[in-house]
Image (cartoon, grey):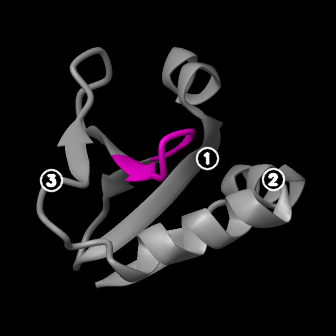
């Protein structure tokens, strides 16, 4: 599994607080942990990964086990427009 950070994701990640960045890095390290990801019903093909209580990571599966990280931020902000 390879992770690809889009420009949009990287920009949003850099805007997070140091605590938020640490939570995102920790979540990405345990990416395959059961129960941490779920498919988004409103956006087919997109998935949500929890990074603590406050932050969410939106991603989709690309070709050849590529995970494309699309968006990161607070729960409400990210889920309104992944």
The N terminus lies in which quarter of the figure? bottom left
User: Along the line of sight, which residue is nearer the eye, 19 or 44?
Assistant: 19
Q: Secondary structure at mark 3?
A: loop
Disc 1 crowd, CA 10 A, few/some/many (<14, 14-19, 20+): many
User: Along the line of sight, which residue is nearer the eye, 65 or 26?
Assistant: 26
Tell me which segment is drawn in magenta. Answer: 49-57
Residue 63 in percent (x, y) is at 26, 69
**On screen, 4 above or below 10?**
below
Position of residue 55 in the picture relative to residue 28 (left or right): right
Q: Nearer the viewer, mark 1 or mark 3?
A: 3
Residue picked out by circle 1: 72
Q: Secondary structure at mark 1?
A: strand
Residue picked out by circle 3: 35
| Residue 36 falls inside the magenta stretch | no
At 88% from the left edge and 51% from the top edge, which residue is drawn?
Answer: 15
The Cα–Cα distance between marks 2 and 3, rounded to whole angstroms, is: 24 Å
At 44% from the left edge and 68% from the top edge, which residue is drawn?
Answer: 27
């Amino acid at each position: 599994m390879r992770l690809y950070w889009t420009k949009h994701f990287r920009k949003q990640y850099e805007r997070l607080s140091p605590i938020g960045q640490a939570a995102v890095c920790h979540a990405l390290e345990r990416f395959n942990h059961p129960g941490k990801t779920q498919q988004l019903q409103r956006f087919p093909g997109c998935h949500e990964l929890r990074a603590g209580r406050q932050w969410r990571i939106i991603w989709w599966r690309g070709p050849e086990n590529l995970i494309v990280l699309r968006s990161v931020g607070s729960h409400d902000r990210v889920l309104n427009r992944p």
